[in-house]
Amino acid sequence: MGNQPAVTRKREISIVNRATLRELTVFGLLLAIGMLGRWAQPDWNFTPIAAVTALGGFYFRRLLPAVLLPVSILAISDLTLAAHDSWPIMVSVHAMMIVPLLIGRSVRNTSGWQAAWRWGLCGVVPATAFYVVINLAVWAFIGIYDKTFAGLAACYVAAVPFYRTMLAGDVFYLAVLLGCLAIARATSKTPALVTTR
């Protein structure tokens, strides 16, 4: 009987260690998926980065790993990709990863239709926000387009193929990653895959 608290503490430490190991494993997998996907098709934006960021925002209990995930993906993959046209473009690209992160975070305490419509938003909103903000930055900071309304319109029109491809990539990768999460939850022997605050 006197040994009961020590046994309980060991069991609690073991559970915490498994949860930490699982989070590190998921972080590593999502990081690899994000980087490899970004390296595979950087020109047309058919990448998993928004889906990975949203899933990280949803999955991780603490905000820090959820934030470090897209920052790490972008920082590491930028080492081998062509440089951004200017630092304002790079800052805009990095800042836009807040959108899927926030949507993924907002799904954490929802279920049913509430969760479904937010995941649906996550398939559309990040690419749309990225398209609007990044092309505004390209128009404002790169000398390709006239600084007129016609120049701005030309910039947005020229970017439609990139937007279309990014949107398709976001929807595709989000569906794949959510499917993987559902399979992992269904086959898990422990209820610890359920995210909690």
Image: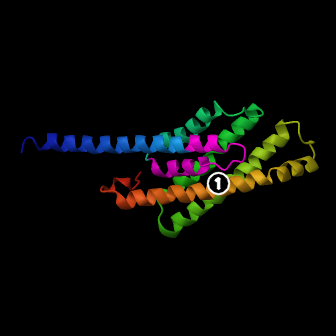
Q: How crowded is mark 1: few (under 14 residues within 10 Å), some or many (20 or more)?
A: many
The reply, left or right, for residue 91 in relation to residue 106 is right
Location of residue 10 (image quadrant): top left
Q: Position of residue 76 (x, y in %)?
A: 59, 33
Q: Nearer the viewer, residue 85 or 92?
A: 85
Looking at the rendered structure, the kind of residue marked 1 is Gly
Q: Residue furthest bottom?
A: 113
Which stretch appears magenta? 34-60
Judged by its main secondary structure, the magenta piece is helix
Q: Nearer the viewer, residue 33 or 150?
A: 33
Magenta highlight on residue 62:
no
| Pointer 1 residue | 169
Magenta highlight on residue 40:
yes
Q: Residue furthest left?
A: 1
Is the residue 121 above or below the residue 92 in the image? below
Give the residue at x 54% y 45%: 33
The reply, left or right, for residue 94 in relation to residue 188 is right
What is the quadrant of the N terminus in the image? top left
Q: Which residue lies furthest to the front in this view?
A: 40
Q: Residue furthest top?
A: 79
Q: Can residue 107 be seen in this view?
A: no
The reply, left or right, for residue 117 in relation to residue 167 is left
Q: Is mark 1 on a helix, strand or loop?
A: helix
Q: Where is residue 74 in the image (x, y as percent from the top left)?
A: 61, 37
Q: Position of residue 180 (x, y in %)?
A: 47, 56
Give the residue at x 41% y 54%: 195
